């Protein structure tokens, strides 16, 4: 297999996605070698700050959906977010990811001074946002304030599937337009999807892979679907870890320079999630910086891992976990470089 995979052959992509045994291991080995050639055997860290569990949307899979009356809602203050940044910075992290539900409280008038403060206080750190769909004007204003990266999963390249897992007030066209707006403004942009979402076919995942290859985002997040008990998808099974790992490996070969996390969802389903993801080509881990008393409340899915090696307090344990497979931590902020 070549180090860079062509996205045009759907049959090849589908065969690799569904591979098992020696074929799957060869795919992941190729991906891990490709990542190592470009990034070495060192993994970037991104400090995750979950700003708010309020969300205006009603996505069928998500525990934060607005109709979930049992959800524990919280909203961090600006001072709490800055405290999280300070904890992360002292721990060596040089990227802060502000992630939250689509909460109208976090208007530009509140976010812009916060972002400027973070950027001024930590000029050698990157600021990543993951706050859902906003207007192009808002994205531009937040970028001008100092945010340089934005994560916005496309969730489904197949319009029919996208519409099936969302309510009618959300639009496939708006989601794709938002991603393109982010790219045009100059953000390092992240896309991604869940594997195993109800109604998803292997051909839909191939659509995802081809869309990712065509738009060439700098970051790609792929994790398993995990059901939440207070959603319409409560009784569906979780996604297939093997298929997740194959998809991660395929993306590494499609976009060799991409920043790809070994996701928290993967670690939630498997105690070896970090190691499995890295050995399939992932090169990022996102320790949780949120205050410990709110971590369980940011419950997109059931049983989210937010302690141990998934948390900033567990970085030493994470170092040992990575060392067991021959990897270390790279504490640099790790900007995407298409010239690598």
Image: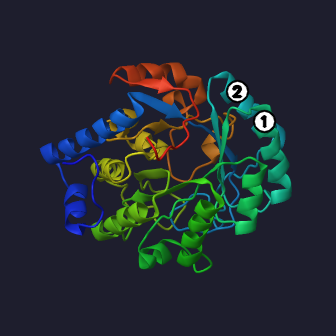
**Which residue is under mark 2?**
87
At x 20%, y 62%, the residue is 12
Q: Residue at x 13, y 43 (%)?
A: 22
Vertical position of residue 181 compared to residue 54: above or below: below
Q: Which residue is mark 1?
A: 82
> What label sits on residue 23 in the rendered view?
none
Which of the pair 216/226 is nearer the observer? 216
For the point 50% across and 64% down, the residue is 154
Q: Is residue 272 visible?
A: no
Which structural element holds mark 1? helix
Location of residue 179 in the rendering, given as x and y in whole percent from the top left corner: 57, 65
Measuring from the top left, give residue 137's x and y in whole percent: 75, 67
Task: Identify the mark nearer the N-term, 2 or 1.
Answer: 1
**Callout 2: SS:** helix
Q: Quadrant of residue 80?
A: top right
Q: Decide: is 234 above or below 337.
A: below
Is 122 drawn above or below residue 176 in the view shown? above
Q: Badge 2 local density, few (<14 within 10 Å), some, or many (20+)?
A: some
Image label count: 2
Q: Position of residue 322 (x, y in %)?
A: 40, 25
> Does 30 sit left or right of 309 as displayed?
left
Q: Give the distance between the C-alpha atoms of the residues marked 2 and 1, in whole angstroms.
A: 9 Å
Q: Position of residue 267 (x, y in %)?
A: 42, 39
Work out which residue is located at the far front of the displayed protein and give it: 339
Residue shown at 80% from the left, 36% from the top: 120
Q: Are marks 2 and 1 in contact (CB under 8 Å)?
A: no
Which residue is nearer to you in this view: 336 or 110? 336
Of residues 119 and 67, the one nearer the viewer is 119
Q: Residues within 10 Å of mark 1 (few under 14, many from 20)?
A: some
């Amino acid at each position: 297999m070549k180090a860079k995979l062509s996205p045009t052959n759907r049959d090849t992509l589908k065969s690799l996605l569904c591979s098992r045994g020696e074929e799957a291991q060869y795919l992941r080995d190729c991906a891990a070698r490709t990542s190592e050639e470009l990034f070495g055997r060192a993994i970037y860290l991104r400090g995750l700050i979950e700003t708010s569990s309020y969300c205006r949307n009603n996505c069928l899979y998500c525990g934060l959906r607005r109709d979930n009356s049992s959800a524990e809602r919280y909203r961090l203050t600006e001072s709490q977010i800055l405290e999280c940044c300070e904890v992360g910075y002292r721990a060596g992290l040089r990227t802060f990811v502000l992630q939250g539900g689509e909460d109208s409280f976090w208007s530009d008038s509140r976010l812009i001074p916060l972002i400027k403060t973070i950027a001024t206080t930590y000029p050698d750190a990157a600021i990543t946002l993951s706050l859902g769909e906003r207007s192009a004007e808002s994205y531009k204003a937040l970028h001008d304030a100092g945010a340089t990266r934005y994560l916005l999963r496309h969730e489904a390249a197949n319009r029919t599937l996208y519409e099936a897992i969302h309510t009618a007030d959300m639009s496939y066209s708006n989601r794709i337009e938002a991603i393109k707006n982010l790219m045009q403004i100059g953000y390092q942009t992240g896309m991604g999807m869940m594997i195993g979402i109800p109604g998803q076919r292997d051909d839909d995942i191939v659509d995802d892979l081809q869309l990712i290859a065509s738009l060439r985002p700098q970051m790609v997040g792929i994790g398993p679907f995990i059901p939440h008990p207070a959603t319409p998808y409560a009784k569906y099974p979780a996604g297939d870890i093997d298929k997740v790992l194959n998809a991660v490996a395929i993306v590494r070969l499609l976009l060799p320079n991409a920043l790809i996390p070994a996701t928290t969802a993967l670690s939630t389903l498997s105690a070896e999630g970090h190691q499995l993801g890295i050995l399939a080509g992932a090169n990022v881990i996102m320790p949780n910086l949120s205050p410990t008393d709110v971590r369980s409340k940011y419950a997109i899915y059931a049983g989210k891992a937010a302690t141990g090696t998934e948390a900033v307090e567990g970085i030493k344990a994470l170092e040992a976990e990575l060392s067991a497979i021959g990897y270390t931590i790279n504490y640099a902020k790790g900007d995407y470089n298409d010239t690598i």
